Image: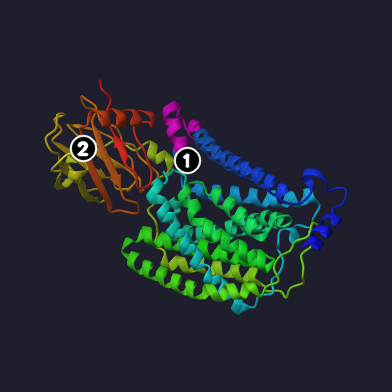
Amino acid sequence: MDVVNMGQRASQGPGQSGWRRDGPRFALVAWVIATLALTIAVTIALAAVATIATARAAIGGVRSGVQLEVIAKEAIGSGAAPWIMVIASQAVLLACAWLACRVLGKPARERLGLVATNLGPLPATILLVATTAPFALGIVAAWLVERVVGSPNGEAIGLQRMWYEGSRLESAGWIVLIALLPGFAEEVFYRGFLQRGLLLRWKPTASIATSSLLFAVVHGDPVSAAAVFPLGLWLGVVAWRCGSVVMTFAMHAGINGLWTAGMMILHRAPASESILVGIALAATVVGVVAFPWAMAILRRQPGDIPSASGTCAPARRPLRLLPRVAFAVLGAGVLSLLLVPAGTAQPAPDAVAERSVPSYDELEANATESIVCRAMGDGGAAEFLLRPGIGVRVTLPPNRLGINTAIVMLDDTGATVWLAYAGERSGKGGARRPAGIVEQLAAGDPTVLSMTLSPGPPPVRVRLTLEEDEAGMVAAFEQATAKGWARRGRDESIICTTRKR
């Protein structure tokens, strides 16, 4: 190893001194710059979407600042937002990796590990199958972390919205995009540029652990980070032993595509849950069985010892895996046209902004189902299903506010939940479901109605509670005011309260 390090130091020319010398320091600085650039690029792209939407509305005659703000928010939460986020972020990641190689003065192909492997079709297949084991471990880790820290707050512009939105053609295109683009860009940057830079000075264990940790950190919340960390470790080991990111790109693309397709089917056809769980368990068992075989295959690989000159040794028998992966993912996308049902169509921002508020009489006329909430708080929560256009009349227990009945209805688009009592009604359209929107209602004193809505297409499962604790009411009142009278998010309570007059 000393000979290798001496050769690396000797190969560094005078133009590669200071921070520009390849190694862990340069790689980590480049990661910080790339992460900041990625965040800025996504922010600028979404700001451009909002600006274009508001400009079009202003040209069309909209002058109200409040209405323009609503249009801007709905544009950011539109179906185009996830596409823009993925394309912008991954393009920036690839650009940063390429620019870093230019700064170092090294050939990008060799420095980033875009070289052939010496794996045959059978060993490559075994490695692909074994990937389900660390991925399943990540799912379990995410579940455990979620039990401790809670579910992450859903945002109007989340990648998960594509699980339940879009036509079949749009869904197939999304599967192809989310498999190929992040699969390629993230492997090139994290397992190619970052990890290979760390390996120039650090031991493989430290290099793989660090690159995997940073890979997990950029996924945002602790639950997502826990889910991808074990997969990152596995991909790091494969890239190190094979001396290439071609194999890890195939693994990453396969996981992204299959997971996305599975989530689409689950959220759009809840009845398929048992079948999907069975398939996932079977794939995990096969992956666990294949994992020791995969490790034995990797031990026979020469291992990646990158040099400071950027060359990669030794020469390898080519495996044309890249085009094979591309064709396989494209085929999976075409197959999803048949297997993945169409998602719930989302209204355009303009349509949402102009949607009329139904009258109390209209809501009451559509309340054809009834349910009784027998007690206050969680112990007396009323649980029921909402179907588009059909209201549910909830009889509430005696309370000091004198609210006897509440009417809850999901509108025909599945995007808005209307709630009415004491002859008052309100609501706000939401381009994003499953969260739905519950707006404040006018009454005498502050009233706290807590409502949880299930994800996925209708029917929507609702859990409604009425709290009368003074401290809880004040806290919910302040929170609802700070959040514009409504809070949207996946599987979280949506607070509905009123302003004291």
Please tell me which of labels 1 and 2 falls first in the chain: 1
Q: Do we see residue 160 in this rendering?
A: yes
Judge left or right: residue 9 versus residue 199. right
Closest to the camera, between mark 1 and mark 2, is 2
Check if residue 58 falls in the magenta segment.
Answer: yes
Q: Which residues are magenta?
A: 57-73
Image coords of residue 223 (percent x, y): 45, 50
Image coords of residue 415 (percent x, y): 34, 45
Judge left or right: residue 159 versus residue 424. right
Q: Nearer the viewer, residue 270 or 234?
A: 234
Q: Do we see residue 438 in this rendering?
A: no
Q: Looking at this rendering, what residue extends furthest in the front direction?
A: 2
The amino acid type found where label 2 is placed reads Leu
Q: Is residue 160 above or below residue 319?
A: above
- Residue at the (73%, 47%) spot, across then down: 26
- Residue at the (71%, 54%) spot, across then down: 197
The label number, if any, that marks residue 315 in the structure image? none
Q: Nearer the viewer, residue 452 or 46?
A: 452
Q: Secondary structure at mark 1?
A: helix
- The residues tagged by marks 1 and 2 sit, at their Cα atoms, a distance apart of 33 Å
The label number, if any, that marks residue 75 in the structure image? 1
Q: Nearer the viewer, residue 451 or 4?
A: 4
Check if residue 16 falls in the magenta segment.
Answer: no
The amino acid type found where label 1 is placed reads Ala
The label number, if any, that marks residue 466 in the structure image? 2
- Residue at the (57%, 73%) spot, across then down: 294
